[in-house]
Each structure stands twice: as C-alpha cells, then as structure tokens.
Image (cartoon, rainbow, N blue to C red):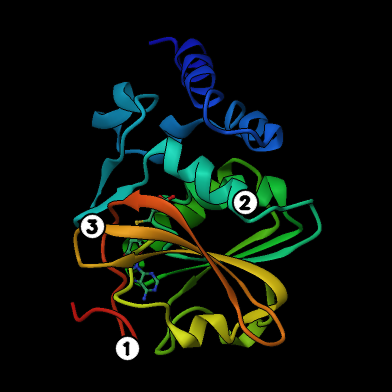
Amino acid sequence: MDYRAARASLIDHLSSEIRDRRVLEVMARIPRERFVPPEERHLAYEDRPLPIGFEQTISQPFIVALMTQALELTGTEKVLEIGAGSGYQAAILAELAGQVITVERLPSLAEAARTVLGNLGYHNVVVHLAGETLGWPDEAPYDAIMATAAAPAVPPELVAQLAIGGRMVIPVGSRYVQQLYKITRQKKKDKIQDLGGCCFVPLIGRGAWDE
Ligand code: SAH
C-alpha cells in the first residue's frame, strides 16, 4: 500500500476545513500507520477513528487537526495531553510545541505509545501512567491542555493546571456524544467556545466517569 499517497490525499481533504498550515504540514509528515495495529493499517488514512485495543480508539484525523489548531501552538509551549492512547496526537503536539507531557491510564497503551514515540525519535515527549488526580499536576502550569477522552463537565482540576492565557480543548457531554469545548483561562472569568459536536471514549477517574 502507498501510504505516502494516501496521506497526501487525506491532508488535501483536511485542508478544506483546517486553516493552520503548520498543523497540516506536520500531519503530512507523521506516519499514522505506525500508531495503529497491523490489521488496521490499510485504513490509516481514512478520515475516521480506528480501534487500538482495550476498547479505545485513535481519534479521527479531522478532529485531531481541529483540536490541535485550537491550541494555537507556536513551538515553545509546555503541553499536557490526557489520554495518550496510540501516541499519535502526542507526536503531532511534539512537533508543534516545546515539550509534551501525556498521561494514559492503561499501562499497555502507555508502554506501546512510549515505544513508537521513541522509535520515531521524539525526545520532547514523556508518557506517564495516570495517577489519582486528572492530568499531571506535578508539572503544571501548562500553556495548553488537550483531553482526548470525554468528561461529563469541564473538570476544575484540569482548568487549575492551565496557565493564565493558556488554552484547553476537551470533549464535554454524555458518555457517547459530546461538544468540543475550547477554554481559555483568564484572570477573571474563563472564556468558553463551542467548536462543534464530537464522539470520544470516556475520561475515566475521579472528577470524570466511573469505569
Ligand atoms: N490521543 C489518543 C487517543 C486517545 S483515546 C491517540 O492519539 O491515539 C482516549 C485515551 O484516554 C484512552 O487510551 C484511555 O485509556 C485514556 N484515558 C481515559 N481516562 C483517562 C484518564 N483519567 N487519564 C489518562 N488517560 C485516560
């Protein structure tokens, strides 16, 4: 299979909706096929989520691009991702920010993400096994936070890990369908924007959903 051609055609499709050229350029370089199980590889450049085991999914490329664009990264930021999953989104963030901390609650996925990110030569990403508190408070504040699993409401523990002026994107809603929110932390009242409907696996833990 010609992954290169399939990737170029996916990026061409995304470019009708995504205006941040840096996001498109990075996605045009990263081999998404390396982040999915062998039996899914032929589908790596379809614009759809794919199963990665343990009832989890690698997100749809369009949603990945939309969420990444919303973080407004310039190359220097410290970014937190919640839900490393396959590691694909973390690789994109690593290309666009200074430093990436990603947390994952399932040890097998965390280990696999660490391996593929290492093999692809990403040295500015750390994959942590999730602790009791949502996110990774030890290294807060972050310039940007991306939650790639859905919460029933915006978790205050995550907003607290955001720097003033920092951006967070997070799917919020029911266990099965959500709205994608962008929250900009401000000194007084945080700004909240709705980026549209989406469909993510649940964020599990204290402050989110039960397993
Ligand atoms: N960003 C991923 C897709 C993530 S799917 C990628 O690019 O492939 C969502 C992931 O969030 C799952 O792997 C799930 O195990 C993880 N997750 C769910 N609740 C979590 C929590 N509280 N902390 C960290 N990870 C969590």
Q: Which mark is residue 177?
A: 3
Q: Residue at point 63% right, 33% down?
A: 19
How far separated are the C-alphas under marks 2 and 1?
A: 26 Å
What residue is shown with label 2? 93
Instruction: Give how far across and how far down residue 32 sits, in percent.
Output: 46, 33
Task: For ligand 1, give the image quadrant.
Answer: bottom left
Instruction: Give how far across and how far down residue 108 sits, in percent.
Output: 32, 62
How many numbered marks does the figure carry?
A: 3
Quarter of the image where one finds residue 189: bottom right
For discs 1 and 3, the disc positioned in front in the rendered view? 3
Question: Which residue type does callout 2 highlight?
Answer: Leu
Q: Say which label, 1 or 3, has the lower sequence index.
A: 3
Figure quadrant of the C terminus:
bottom left
Q: Residue at point 60% right, 40% down?
A: 120
What residue is shown with label 1? 206
Secondary element under disc 3, as helix, strand or loop, is loop
Question: Which residue type does callout 3 highlight?
Answer: Val
Q: Say which label, 3 or 2, has the lower sequence index.
A: 2
Secondary element under disc 2, as helix, strand or loop, is helix
Instruction: Give how far across and how far down residue 71 sits, in percent.
Output: 63, 56
Q: Reply above or below: 169 against 165.
A: above
Secondary element under disc 1, as helix, strand or loop, is loop
Q: Reply above or below: 86 against 106.
A: above
Q: Residue at point 47% right, 20% down?
A: 13
Q: Reply above or below: 84 against 65.
A: below
Q: How many other residues sit within 10 Å of disc 2, few (<14), some (14-19) or many (≥20)?
A: many
Q: Nearer the viewer, residue 128 or 68?
A: 68
Quarter of the image where one finds residue 165: bottom right
